[in-house]
C-alpha cells in the first residue's frame, strides 16, 4: 500500500500537507465482482481495459464504453474527450507506445483513500519506464450500469491503494471464478454438504492438475476415514481432506479427533496427511449461502499437516 511520508503528499509535483486536504475513505465491498451480476459485468469491462493496454488492442474494450463516455487527464487542462474523439486518441496512443517500445506495466489495485472522490474503487496502476524517466499514473473508472462512462488518468499520489488479490489467482494475475454445474432440479437451491464437498474436490483436482501434480485418486463419499484426494508430488504422496467453509470466516475451528482418522491410513502408506480448508464465496448470495448453479470465488486457507 502506498503511504504518505512525514504527513505530506505530492500532487502533480507539488507537496501539500495532509491536514490541509480532506480525504475520502473507500470500501470496495459494493464493487466486489463476486456479489452481483452487475458487479461481475463491470469487472469484466474493467479487465477488458487492462487487457487492451496489455495487448495495445483497442478492440478489447471500446465496445464496453457508454455512448456518453468521457475521458480526461489530470495533466491536461483541455475539456474531456467524448467517445469518438477518445477512440481516435487511444488508437494513436497505442500506436505511439508500439513505435517507442514504451509498454507500461499494468497492475489492478484497490483504492483505499484519497483526496478526490471515486465511484468505483478498482483502478489500473500504470508504471512506464523509458530511457530518460519513470512515469506512474492511475486510471480510474466510472460506470453507467455495466458500461464504462468515464476514464480519468490521474497522479497516483492523490490516492493510497494496494494490489488486488482475492481467492484463487489465475495465470494472468486476476481473480479466477468457478462455475458450479448442477442438475436442472437443483439450480437455485442451497447446496448440501455433499454437493459443496464434491464441488470442492473437482476444483482442487483441477488446480492440482494445472500445477503439474499427479492426482492418484479422488473419493466423493465423504467418508472421514479416507482422504478426499490423493496426489503425488516429487515422489511423495499427499492424502488430502477438504474442510469446506464460507467466507468471510478466516479462522477454521478444526477438531483433531476422529475427524482425521484418515491420517492413520496415510501413515501406514508413508504419505503425508493434510487437512485443507477451502472457502466458497457465492456471488448470488453475497457469500451468505452457497447456491447450486452459481459462480464462486474460492479461497484456500493454510494447509494443516496431521
Image (tube, helix red, strand yellow):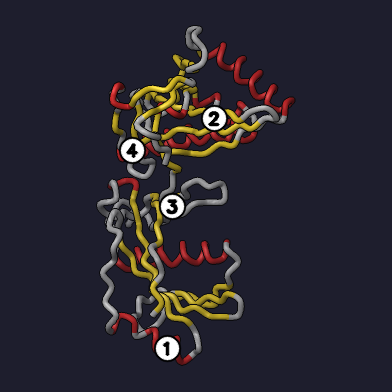
* Dot 2 or dot 1, earlier in sequence: 2
Q: Residue furthest front?
A: 6
Residue contact at pointers 2 and 3, CB within 8 angstroms: no
Q: Horizontal placement of 279 versus 267: left or right?
A: left
- Helix, strand or loop for disc 3: strand
Numbered badge on residue 265: 1
Q: Which mark is residue 136?
A: 2
- Dot 4 or dot 2: first in sequence order is 4
User: Who is closer to the viewer here, 18 or 291?
Assistant: 18
Q: Nearer the viewer, mark 3 or mark 1?
A: 1
**Which of these two is toward me, 288 or 199?**
288
Relative vertical location of residue 33 with respect to residue 102 in this rendering, above or below: below
Q: Secondary structure at mark 4?
A: helix
Q: Nearer the viewer, mark 3 or mark 4?
A: 4
Q: CA distance from mark 2 to mark 1?
A: 55 Å
Say few, some or many: other residues with alpha carbon within 10 Å of mark 2 (under 14 / 14 to 19 / 20 or more).
some
Viewer-nearest of discs 2 and 3: 2
Looking at the image, which is closer to me, 58 or 79? 79
Q: Marks 4 and 1, how far apart in space?
A: 45 Å
Task: Judge left or right: residue 291 versus residue 63.
Answer: left
Q: Residues within 10 Å of mark 4 (few under 14, many from 20)?
A: some
Labels 3 and 1: the sequence-earlier one: 3
Q: Which residue is mark 3?
A: 179
Which residue is outermost to the top? 78
Amino acid at each position: 500500500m502506498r503511504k504518505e511520508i512525514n504527513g505530506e503528499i505530492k500532487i502533480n509535483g507539488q507537496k501539500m500537507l495532509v491536514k490541509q486536504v480532506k480525504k475520502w475513505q473507500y470500501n470496495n465491498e459494493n464493487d466486489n465482482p463476486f456479489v452481483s451480476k452487475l458487479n461481475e459485468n463491470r469487472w469484466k469491462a474493467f479487465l477488458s481495459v487492462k487487457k487492451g493496454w496489455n495487448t495495445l488492442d483497442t478492440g478489447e474494450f471500446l465496445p464496453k464504453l457508454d455512448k456518453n463516455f468521457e475521458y480526461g487527464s489530470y495533466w491536461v487542462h483541455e475539456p474531456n474527450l467524448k467517445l469518438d474523439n477518445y477512440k481516435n486518441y487511444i488508437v494513436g496512443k497505442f500506436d505511439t507506445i508500439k513505435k517507442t517500445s514504451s509498454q507500461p506495466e499494468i497492475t489492478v489495485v484497490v483504492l483505499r483513500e484519497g483526496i478526490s472522490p471515486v465511484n468505483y474503487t478498482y483502478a489500473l496502476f500504470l508504471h512506464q519506464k523509458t530511457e530518460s524517466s519513470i512515469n506512474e499514473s492511475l486510471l480510474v473508472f466510472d460506470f453507467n450500469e455495466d458500461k464504462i462512462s468515464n476514464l480519468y488518468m490521474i497522479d497516483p499520489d492523490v490516492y493510497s491503494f494496494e494490489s488486488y488479490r482475492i481467492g484463487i489467482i489465475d495465470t494472468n494475475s486476476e481473480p479466477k471464478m468457478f462455475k458450479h454445474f448442477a442438475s436442472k432440479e437443483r439450480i437455485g437451491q442451497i447446496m448440501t454438504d455433499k454437493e459443496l464437498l464434491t464441488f470442492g474436490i473437482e476444483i482442487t483436482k483441477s488446480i492440482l492438475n494445472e500445477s503439474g501434480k499427479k492426482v492418484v485418486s479422488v473419493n466423493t463419499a465423504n467418508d472421514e476415514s479416507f482422504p478426499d484426494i490423493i496426489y503425488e508430488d516429487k515422489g511423495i504422496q499427499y492424502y488430502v481432506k477438504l474442510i469446506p467453509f464460507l467466507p468471510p470466516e478466516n479462522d477454521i475451528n478444526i477438531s483433531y479427533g476422529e475427524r482425521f482418522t484418515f491420517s492413520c491410513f496415510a501413515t501406514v502408506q508413508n504419505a503425508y496427511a493434510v487437512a485443507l480448508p477451502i472457502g466458497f464465496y457465492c456471488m448470488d448470495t453475497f457469500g451468505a449461502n452457497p447456491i447450486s448453479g452459481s459462480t464462486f470465488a474460492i479461497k484456500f486457507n493454510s494447509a494443516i499437516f496431521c
